[in-house]
Image (cartoon, grey):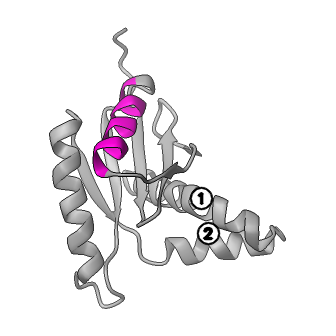
Amino acid sequence: MENSFIRILSLDVGEKRIGMAVSDVLCLIAQQLETLTRSNEADDFSRIRDIVKDKEVSEIVVGFPLNMDGTEGPKAAEINRFIEGLKKECDVPIKIWDERLTTREADRILRAADVSRKKRKKLDDKLAAQLILQSYLDSRGI
């Protein structure tokens, strides 16, 4: 089914989980998706590929962990490797987006909402993905 709208998928890639969010078709609002519990890269990529197909995603934005001074650290190298693998599995453009402080901001928001520590762990990743995507969408000036 062809349409003139696009959707953008955001990934907050961690060691144990991948938080995910997707834009609306107008690319104005980021909406949380489920958090993917990581097993192995092949399964992770397969699940992401399924989401790209199911949600008709035309672009992926991956949160990129820069150091506070803007330099790339060891985590950035891990994300670069992840992206290279993902590019082989998903036939859509993949972009990186500065994720500095998004996990901390997600935790702050959940604390302010008086969400328990146990529930915060489950919600942090997808809220971080939503914050990454909303920041990216807002930067486009649409």
Cα distance, mark 2 to mark 1?
6 Å
Dot label at residue 106: 2
Query: For this rendering, which residue is in front, 119 or 20?
Result: 119
Residue 90 drawn above or below residue 105 = above
Report the residue marked by disc 1. Answer: 127
Q: Quadrant of the N terminus?
A: top left
Q: Residues within 10 Å of mark 2 (few under 14, many from 20)?
A: many
Rendering quarter of residue 90: top left
Which label's residue is closer to the chain start, 2 or 1? 2
Position of 120 compared to 114: left or right?
left
- The amino acid type, in three-letter code, at marker 2 is Ala
- The amino acid type, in three-letter code, at marker 1 is Leu
Q: Is residue 83 visible?
A: yes
Query: For this rendering, which residue is in front, 47 or 100?
Result: 47
Q: Position of residue 84 (x, y in %)?
A: 16, 53
Residue 15 drawn above or below residue 67 = above
Q: Residues within 10 Å of mark 1 (few under 14, many from 20)?
A: many
Rendering quarter of residue 49: top left
Q: Which secondary structure class fits the magenta region best?
A: helix
Residue 5 drawn above or below residue 130 = above
Position of 103 compared to 88: left or right?
right
Range covered by the magenta-colored residues: 41-53
The reply to whether discs 2 and 1 touch (Cβ–Cβ < 8 Å) is: yes
Rendering quarter of residue 93: top left
